Image: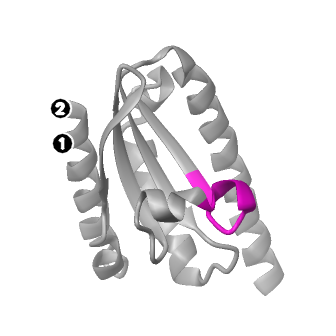
Amino acid sequence: MKKSVYLISVLILIISGLSINSAISKNKTQKNYVKVVYFHGDYRCATCFKLEKYSYKVLDKYFAKEMKSGKVVWASINVDKDKNEHYVDEFNLYNKSLIIMKYENGKLKEWKNLEKIWELVGEQSKYLKYVRKEIEKYLKG
């Protein structure tokens, strides 16, 4: 049973990775966009996976059109990898985090750490609503 749950989780992450790569490749021509990044480490508990799953669910459910066009980009980044360690200082990361970044003319204009995800992870509907509103703010300006 545990093996099948683990395999399903891995498959979901692989499938979302395909969507991530698709959105990133389309974004090469987009200069103004919002990037939503879930930062994690090597060690990931069930809650950590839930944070990522809910975050991606918001994008898939409410911003699929924007992701397809490259206006919204999703990424999941392991900061324990040498090439990604710089994000810890760049975004003042001290825990698993969901960061929204606004790019204008291809340059990072502003960003926000959605710290309330930890409070809301036990209430999926509130979590989705919170993340959705924050992304909408960045898309509107």
* Residue 103 in the image, given as x and y percentages of width and height: 36, 31
Q: Is residue 82 magenta?
A: yes
Residue at the spot 28% in from the left edge and 45% down from the top edge: 135
Residue 140 image label: 2
* Residue 132 in the image, given as x and y percentages of width and height: 27, 51
Mark 1 in CB contact with mark 2 (< 8 angstroms): yes
Above/below status of 68 relative to 4: above
Indicate left or right for 137 with 75 as reference: left
Q: Is residue 90 magenta?
A: no
Look at the image and tell me whether residue 62 can be seen.
no
Q: In this orientation, which residue lies closer to the viewer: 131 or 98?
A: 98
Count residues near mark 2 (Cα–Cα under 10 Å), then give few for <14, some for 14-19, many for 20+: few
Residue at the spot 45% in from the left edge and 77% down from the top edge: 94
Indicate left or right for 85 with 66 as reference: right
Q: In this orientation, which residue lies closer to the viewer: 26 or 94?
A: 94
Residue 137 image label: 1
Disc 1 residue type (three-letter)? Lys
* Residue 55 in the image, given as x and y percentages of width and height: 43, 58
Q: CA distance from mark 1 to mark 2?
A: 5 Å
Which image quadrant for residue 62?
A: top left
Could you tell me which quadrant the N terminus lies in?
A: bottom right
Looking at the rendered structure, the secondary structure element under dot 1 is helix
* Residue 87 in the image, given as x and y percentages of width and height: 53, 57
Could you tell me which quadrant the C terminus lies in?
A: top left
Which image quadrant for residue 130?
A: bottom left
Look at the image and tell me whether residue 6 can be seen.
yes
